[in-house]
Amino acid sequence: ANPCTTDSCGADGQCDHEAIADCCVEDADCDDADPCTLEACAPDNLCDQEVLADCCVEDADCDDADACTTDSCGPDNLCEHEAIEDCE
């Protein structure tokens, strides 16, 4: 049995296997290709996605609204806030 399908017998006597949305068997089934989420396949075979704090894809994701910092997205997808010298 596949935990990611709802199985039934159709009126024509053929088996029907309807896919269950967001279903998974292993963590890799939940990969959304977003570096800012941590994906896991829960025991109920549904995907869980946790948003990672201070994660970014581009510099604009890191705007801390502080005029005295230069905000950027680092190569590790974490925001960096560098102080601007002599800024008040």
Image (cartoon, rainbow, N blue to C red):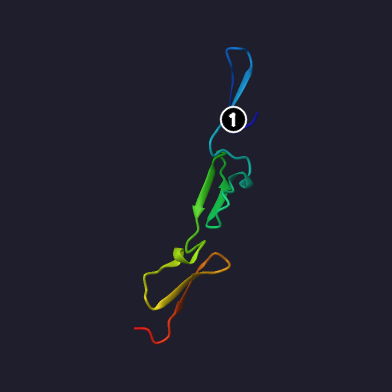
In terms of secondary structure, where does tag 1 sit?
Answer: strand
The image quarter containing residue 71 is: bottom left
Q: From the viewer's perspective, is 84 left or right of 38?
A: left
**Image position, residue 30 (x, y; %):** 58, 45
* Residue under the point 50% across and 52% down: 50
Mark 1 neighbour density, 10 Å: few (under 14) some (14–19) many (20 or more): some
Residue 45 vs residue 36, the one in the foreground: 36
The quarter of the picture where the C terminus appears is bottom left
The image quarter containing residue 15 is: top right
Q: From the viewer's perspective, is 86 left or right of 34?
A: left
Which residue is at the far top?
Answer: 12
Q: Relative to residue 1, is residue 78 depicted above or below? A: below
Q: Relative to residue 72, is residue 26 depicted above or below? A: above
- Say which amino acid is labelled 1: Thr
Q: Which residue is mark 1?
A: 5
* Residue under the point 58% across and 66% down: 76
Which residue is at the far bottom?
Answer: 86
Q: Relative to residue 10, is residue 25 depicted above or below? A: below
The image quarter containing residue 46 is: top right
Q: From the viewer's perspective, is 39 left or right of 86?
A: right
**Image position, residue 24 (x, y; %):** 59, 40
The quarter of the picture where the N terminus appears is top right
**Image position, residue 49 (x, y; %):** 52, 49
* Residue under the point 56% across and 43% down: 42
Q: How many numbered tags mark residues here?
A: 1
* Residue under the point 50% across and 58% down: 52
Residue 86 vs residue 9, the one in the foreground: 86
